[in-house]
Amino acid sequence: MRAAGSGGTKLLAAAGVAGMVGFLLVMDVGAREARLVTKSLPMVCLLAWLWPARGRYARFIFAGLALSLLGDVLLEVGPDLFLPGLGAFLLAHVGYTAAFLSVTRRPALLQALPFVLLAVGATGALWPGLGGMAGPVTAYVAVICTMGWRAAALVGNPALSRREQWLAFGGALLFAASDGLLSIRLFVTPLPGLGYAVMLLYWAAQFCIAASTRRAHAAATMTISSSSLT
């Protein structure tokens, strides 16, 4: 069973929301320690909600969430750790992609086309402001677009419920939107208030992706329980 029952789930949800609100309040004006704690709390709550992660799909998603938490921490520690933070998030997307591939490996070439166009368009739009970050950012864009493509390939696959398919796909799109706004803030122009939209989209994305594991987790738990009774 999950680490959090009904009451535990409500407690985790309340703590996660408190962390979100707290971070939005201190994001631009608070001490680094306050930012670290409040920003980390929603991801810690999601990880606790999914623990223990059973089944390949749930384990890959759990790994992606853990790497995202690492990325959050690295980015808040200081600007000198931007590249390691970017790398942690890149690996998080690799984890999510591996989760989606564990469900289906069908080529889904038609679904790939919008993400190819997005990768090319985003890279071209950002290129003038990237400078020495051109290589890492281009790699990151390619990986997150690949993640979105593989999430799109889940839609219609019976291994996940229809709700979970769309949670995974919606989460991937929300993540792409969050990172798109962040890239505009970092490499194009720091529009006022953009950071708040980035974080709200980011948390929504992570929740959707985490919630897409529910049936996979339940099926694995039932299998383990049945095995222990025989």
Image (tube, rainbow, N blue to C red):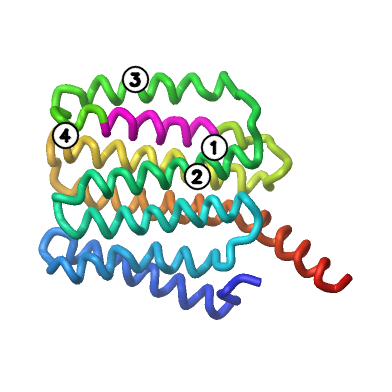
User: From mark 2 to mark 4, how far is it between C-alphas?
Assistant: 26 Å
Q: Quadrant of residue 135?
A: top left
Q: Quadrant of residue 129?
A: top left
Query: What x and y, as percent, mark residue 19?
Result: 32, 69
| Label whose residue precedes the other's in the sequence (3 or 2) | 2
| Label whose residue precedes the other's in the sequence (3 or 1) | 3
Q: Quadrant of residue 134?
A: top left
Mark number displayed over residue 151 = 1
| Label whose residue precedes the other's in the sequence (4 or 3) | 3
Q: Main secondary structure of the magenta part?
A: helix
Q: Which mark's residue is nearer the viewer, 1 or 2?
A: 2
Q: Tell me the amino acid under the disc marked 4.
A: Phe
| Label whose residue precedes the other's in the sequence (4 or 1) | 1
Residue in the image at 23% along x and 62% along y: 24
Q: Are marks 1 and 2 in contact (CB under 8 Å)?
A: yes
**Residue nearest the viewer, comparing 49 with 228:** 228
Q: Is residue 69 left or right of residue 208?
A: left
Mark number displayed over residue 120 = 3
- Secondary structure at badge 2 equals helix
Residue in the image at 32% along x and 44% along y: 87
Q: Are marks 4 and 3 in contact (CB under 8 Å)?
A: no
Mark number displayed over residue 96 = 2
Stretch of the chain drawn in magenta? 136-151
| Label whose residue precedes the other's in the sequence (2 or 4) | 2
Residue at the disc numbered 4: 187
**Residue nearest the viewer, comparing 210 with 66:** 66
Instruction: Report the residue that reaches farthest toward the bottom.
Output: 7
